Image: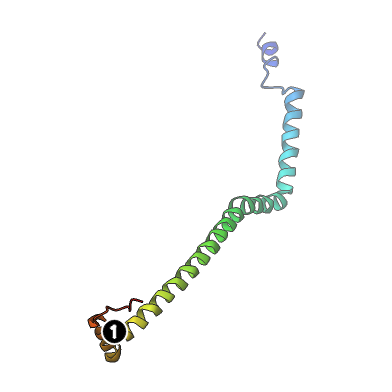
Amino acid sequence: MSESSSSQLPFETPEPRSRLARAWLRSAGSRLVFWAPVWVPLAVLAQVALLGLGPALAESRRLDGAARDLSERLERERTAAAELQRLLRAQSDPIYLERERRLLRAPDGPLPVK
């Protein structure tokens, strides 16, 4: 009786369905490994394109806008600095200072009234 009960155990004789499943997995695994030199670089390229290129282009556009703003601000600051330099030279000129003093002391004020 032990001989007949041991022949009925499922782990001793694999079923045909599990054989087919194992064969399919084996062939799928070998196909996957065979095509790995193709899909691995494609996966890396997709990751760079989706996760790296888009944010890099957005950052480039943001930096271009910031560079334009900065150049406009720099031009305004240079204009203001040139005006301040002109005023400083005028305040250092004794002839200019004397003319200002005379205008302020004039009886009809700094601007003539018509």
Looking at the image, is 101 positioned above or below residue 75? below
User: Is the image coloured rainbow, by chain, by secondary structure, or in one colour?
Assistant: rainbow
Question: Which residue does the image show at 37% across and 83% down from the upper left?
Answer: 86
What kind of residue is marked 1? Gln
Looking at the image, is 10 positioned above or below residue 72? above
Q: Position of residue 71 (x, y in %)?
A: 49, 70
Q: Residue furthest front?
A: 114
Q: Quadrant of the N terminus?
A: top right
Foreground pick, 27 / 105: 105
User: Relative to 60, is 82 on the left or the right?
Assistant: left
Q: Position of residue 85 (x, y in %)?
A: 36, 82
- The answer to which quarter of the image holds residue 78 is bottom left
Looking at the image, is 64 positioned above or below residue 26? below
Question: Which residue does the image show at 59% across and 58% down from the upper left?
Answer: 57
Looking at the image, is 24 positioned above or below residue 56? above
What count of labels does the image hold? 1
> Helix, strand or loop at disc 1?
helix
Foreground pick, 79 / 42: 79
Density class for disc 1 (Cα within 10 Å; few <14, some 14-19, many ≥20) is few
Q: Which residue is mark 1?
A: 91
Q: Residue furthest bottom?
A: 95
Q: Position of residue 91 (x, y in %)?
A: 29, 84
Foreground pick, 112 / 29: 112
Question: Which residue does the image show at 74% across and 22% down from the upper left?
Answer: 15
User: Relative to 50, is 29 on the left or the right?
Assistant: right
Q: Position of residue 36 (x, y in %)?
A: 70, 49
Question: Which residue does the image show at 75% across and 33% down from the upper left?
Answer: 23
Q: Quadrant of the C terminus?
A: bottom left
User: Relative to 54, is 36 on the left or the right?
Assistant: right
